[in-house]
Image (cartoon, helix red, strand yellow):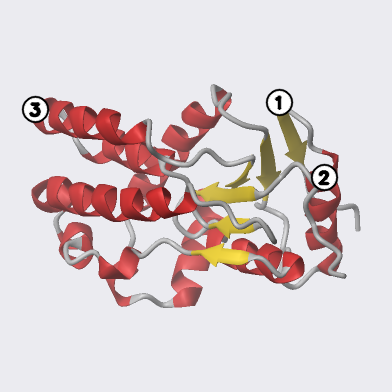
Amino acid sequence: MTDSPFPDHVGYVAVEGVIGAGKTTLARMLAGRAQGRLVLEEFEDNPFLGTFYADRDRWAFQTQLAFLASRFKQQRALLNRDLFGATVADYTFDKDRIFAHVTLSGDELQLYETLYGLMETNAAVPDLVIYLRSSVERLLSNIDRRGRTYEAGMDPEYLRELAAAYDRYFFHYRKSPLLVVDTTQMDFVANEADFEEIIRQIKRVRGGTTYVSPTAA
């Protein structure tokens, strides 16, 4: 019998955060602890991603639509819940709109909103969202450490825009219980106490928004 990190009423968990926040790492750790299904965003399949980082203004719309289609396809599959275990994803469908409002404007944003609105009602809603917050400096350090070629030279201002957009969105988030984790001074990979604190708070979540800070030294 596995020691699940989730209460019985939580079957689908989504981990969110800005680029480099540790979403995929935490999702893998939680899915492993729960012995559940892991769903990872298929970002490397987006044919426009590399050119987007090289020229955001030119390739933002194509990149965003490719992500929207890919994420919607995965979200449709998530509607079929696993009756024998938890599902942990490293993104929410809402992520797509957060990015779109940073990268798009004018007619392109209006067209995107139309397409997003048609898809949103058929996307899965998590039983719990875990939002990883961090400083831009920590995000840049994490991005540099993982060494993805297309992320080399990531613009700090772009990360600041994304971080502000994420904060605005999740300040008003009400679709499901929300756990906000400040990872600026946390290391849930190297420090087991930090990871266990996240799990402890997950088990206590029943509704609303809960905040998790670093454990005391």
Q: CA distance from mark 2 to mark 3?
A: 42 Å
Q: Secondary structure at mark 2?
A: helix
Q: In the image, residue 67 lies at what x, y percent?
A: 27, 53
Q: In the image, residue 37 lies at what x, y percent?
A: 60, 65
Q: Would residue 137 be found to the left or right of residue 109 on screen?
A: right
Q: Secondary structure at mark 3?
A: helix
Marked residue nearer the N-terminal end (2 or 3): 3
Q: CA distance from mark 3 to mark 1?
A: 35 Å
Q: Work out whether residue 153 can be spotted.
A: no
Tag shown at residue 199 = none
Q: Secondary structure at mark 1?
A: loop
Label 3 sits on what residue type?
Asp
From the image, tell me which residue sits under label 3.
107
Label 1 sits on what residue type?
Gly
Residue at 56% x, 27% y: name it. 175
Q: Work out whether residue 97 can be spotted.
A: yes
Q: Would residue 52 be found to the left or right of residue 107 on screen?
A: right
From the image, tell me which residue sits under label 1.
208
